[in-house]
Image (spheres, rainbow, N blue to C red):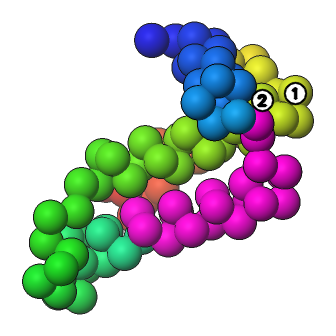
Amino acid sequence: MTIDQAQQLVDNWIKTTGVRYFNELTNTAILMEEVGEVARIMSRKYGEQSFKESDKKVDLGDEMADVLFVLICLANQTGINLTEALEKNLEKKNIRDADRHKNNEKLR
């Protein structure tokens, strides 16, 4: 699936199953909640925190997909084409960071 297809799929889902988009501020708050859920899993799986018994069946991929879903909702609501935005962002990074990471002693 392409990013454009994902944006269309989410838009179709929202307009049929979801009834309508939550407003942008609500979706921003939901995005922060979903990112927090990813952070919680990461701190327990890869960090020093331990899982509670009730947290042991969490699915990191599913939580990341929740983040992506809400991010796509916000892009759709604000008229952002994520394919174009990502391409532009990568172009910026390629110019700005052409030698930056190659010359970073910390990455060797």
Whole-percent x, y for residue 40 in the image: 37, 75
Asked if 66 appears above or below 88 in the picture, the reply is below
Asked if residue 31 lies in the magenta stretch, the reply is: yes
Assign the N terminus to one quadrant of the image. top left
Query: At 64% across and 18% down in the image, what residue appears?
Result: 12
User: Is residue 19 shown to the viewer in this render?
Assistant: yes
Query: At 24% across and 54% down in the image, what residue appears?
Result: 59
Mark 2: few/some/many CA within 10 Å (<14, 14-19, 20+): some
Determine the CA span between mark 1 and mark 2: 5 Å
Whole-percent x, y for residue 39 in the image: 42, 70
Asked if 43 appears above or below 86 in the picture, the reply is below
Assign the C terminus to one quadrant of the image. bottom left
Q: Tell me the amino acid under the disc marked 2.
A: Asn
Query: At 84% across and 60% down in the image, what residue appears?
Result: 25
**Residue 36 as seen in the image, left or right of residue 84:** left
Whole-percent x, y for residue 3 in the image: 57, 18
Q: Which residue is mark 2?
A: 76
User: Is residue 97 shown to the viewer in this render?
Assistant: no
Q: Secondary structure at mark 1?
A: loop
Magenta span of residues: 20-38
Q: Tell me the amino acid under the disc marked 1.
A: Gly
Q: Secondary structure at mark 2?
A: helix
Marker count (numbered): 2
Residue 90 falls in image quadrant: top right
The secondary structure that dominates the magenta segment is helix
Checking the image for residue 79, the label placed there is 1
Residue 47 falls in image quadrant: bottom left
Q: Does the residue at mark 1 contact the one at mark 2 (Cβ under 8 Å)? A: yes
**Residue 58 as seen in the image, left or right of residue 2:** left
